[in-house]
Image: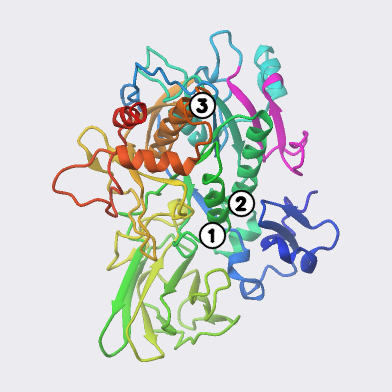
Amino acid sequence: MQKILDENYYDLIISNVMIPTYDTGDNITPMDLRHSLAHIPVDSANPCDLGTYPYNAFPSLLTLSSTVSLEKSGIGTVQRNPYLALFGRGVIVAVIDTGIDYRHQAFLYNDGTTRILSIWDQTIQDGTPPEGFTYGTEYTREFINVALKSENPLSLVPSVDTNGHGTAIASIIAGKPSLEQAFSGVVPESDVLVVKLKQAKNNLKKIFFTPPDAECYQESDLIIGITYVTTVAQRLNRPVVICVAMGTNQSSHDGRGATSFITNYLAQQPHTAITMSTGNEANKRRHYFNSTTAEPYQNSFELSIGENDKLFSIELWPFAPARLSIEITAPNRETTGQVYPALGECRRFAFVFNPSVIWVNNYIFEEETGDQLILMRFQDPLPGIWNIRVQNLDNGPFSFHAWLPSGDLISGDTFFMNSNPDTTITSPANATNPLTVTAYNQFNDTILPESGRGYTRTGFVKPDIAAPGYELTCAVPGNLYGSITGSGSAAAQAAGVVAMVFEWAIPRGNYTNITGNDVNRLLIRGAQRSGGITYPNNIWGYGQIDINTLFERLTNI
C-alpha cells in the first residue's frame, strides 16, 4: 500500500528544503513547488505526537461549505450578457470536492458524450493514477465515453458522488441548461475537470480529536489536487478556473499556510484563477475574540459543551508580544491549573471527579507564523458551562482569537457563550490573491446569516465579493435536480463569472496574459455597491458581483 494511504503513517507537510532530513527513500510525496509530504511511521498514535512534530506539519481538516437539498427552488439561470455570448467555451473549470455524478445529463453533450475532461478519483486504488501521481485512479474523457455507452457504466468507471456536494458545485458552474428545471450553469460550454478527494486519514482525525465518522478532507490532498488540475491545464494549454468550496477553522486565519502559499502563487500566474468560499461559520457561535486593555491583564470566557460532543479541539491565537497562560475549569470546578507557554510541551490533564481528559499544547512559538498558539483538545468533556481563563504573563494589554471546529465536526450544542461573528472566514479563503466569495440571498439582497465574515486575523480585507448563494437550483446525483445554499454555491457562481472573463480575454484574444488576480480586481471594480454602506467591509467585501457592469467596463477599455 502507498504510504500516503496507509494509516500506519502520518502525512506531514514539510518544506522542500527539508526533504534530505526526512527522506528514507520512499516516504516523500511531492505536493507543489514549495511543499512535500513526508510519511512518518505512527508508533503509538499518542495525542502528544502533536508536539513532537510541529502543529503546521499536520494537514488541516476541511469541511464542506454548502448544504444540498433535494427540494427544488425554482431559481432561474445566472445572469449573463447575451451580446457577448460568453458560455465558457475554451475554458476549463475544475472542481476539487466530493466527486461528480458523471452520468447526469447536466454534464453530457446532446449526443450523450461527456463534457468532463477527466476525473481523478483519489478513493479508488485499483486503477491507474494520473501520470506523476501515486494514488487514486484517473478516468479520461475517452474512457468515460466508453462507460457511458455500456449497459453498466459504473462497472467501467465506478467513481460516484455519494455526498452530492461536488455534483452540485460543478453544476452551478457548468451544468447544461434544462428548460424543464429552469436551470443552467453559468458557463455550460466549458470543459469540466474533477478531483474527488479521499477522506482524511483516521490518524489525522485522532490527532485533532475529530469524531471518527466525521466527513472531512485533508489539506494535503487538496493541494495535490490543485497540482493535478494545473498540470492538466498546462498540458492542454487552456485557461483554468479552480473552485474550492470547503474550508477549516484550523490555522491562524491570516492567509498563511501551505494551501494559501500555492493558491496565492497560482492566482498571480497567467490563465489560472481560484475562487474560494468564506465558509458558513458566522452564526455558529464558534469564534471568540477578546481585547484586554486594562488591569488585571486577564480574560475569562465561557464555553458551553453539549452532551454529544465527545471529541473536539479549540485553537487560541494571541497577538504578539503578549505571552499567555491558560487555565481550563470544568462545570464541577475541577481545573487544569495554569498552563504556561513552552517550546514543544504537550500536557495531559485527567480530571478526578468527572470523565474529562484535556490535552494542552501552549506553543510559545508556532513555526509557520511565529505567533503563540494554544491548542486545547477535549475528550469526553463533562457537559455544561466551562470556564477558560487567559492571563498575560507580561502584565500588559493583549488580545486573541479562539475558534472551535468548522462544519459538522461538532454539533450546534457546543459554542462560546459570548461569541463573535466576525473573523469567521474559513481557511484557506483568507489567502491574499484567490477570490474569496461570500453568499447573499438574491431574493431580498441580504447576506446569508451563516456566511463567513472578515477580516482576516491580521486585518486584511476579506471577503472580496458577494455572490448569490441561497437555494440555487443544482444537479444532484441520480439525474435529479435540487437546491444548494451556502458560500460554496456562491463561490461556484463566481467561478463561472471568472470563466466568462477568461473566455473573453484568452480564447477571444482580448487580453491573453490575464491572471486570476487581474480578474479579481476587475470584479471588485465592477461590483454593485449600495448607498449608505462603506466599502470594503467585513460582510460584503467590495459589494455584489455584477456581470453586466464588469463586461461594460471591459468592452470600453
Q: How far is mark 1 from mark 3, CA to CA?
A: 28 Å
* Residue highlighted by disc 1: 210
Is 530 left or right of 479, judged from the image as shown? left
Of residues 524 and 31, the one nearer the viewer is: 524
Query: In terms of image quadrants, where is residue 60?
Result: bottom right
Whichever of labels 2 and 3 marks the residue nearer the N terminus, that label is 2
Q: Who comes first in sequence, dot 2 or dot 1? A: 2
Circle 3 — which element? loop
In the rendered structure, which amino acid carries the disc numbered 1? Thr
Q: Residue 112 appears at what percent x and percent y?
A: 58, 11
Q: Quadrant of residue 178?
A: top left
- Residue 89 at x, y percent in the picture: 51, 20
Give the magenta part as a residue range.
114-142
Name the residue at the left extreme.
532
Q: Which residue is mark 2?
A: 200
Q: Is residue 2 left or right of 241 when viewed as pictured? A: right
Point 73% across, 60% down: residue:
38
Which residue in the structure is indicated by mark 3?
477
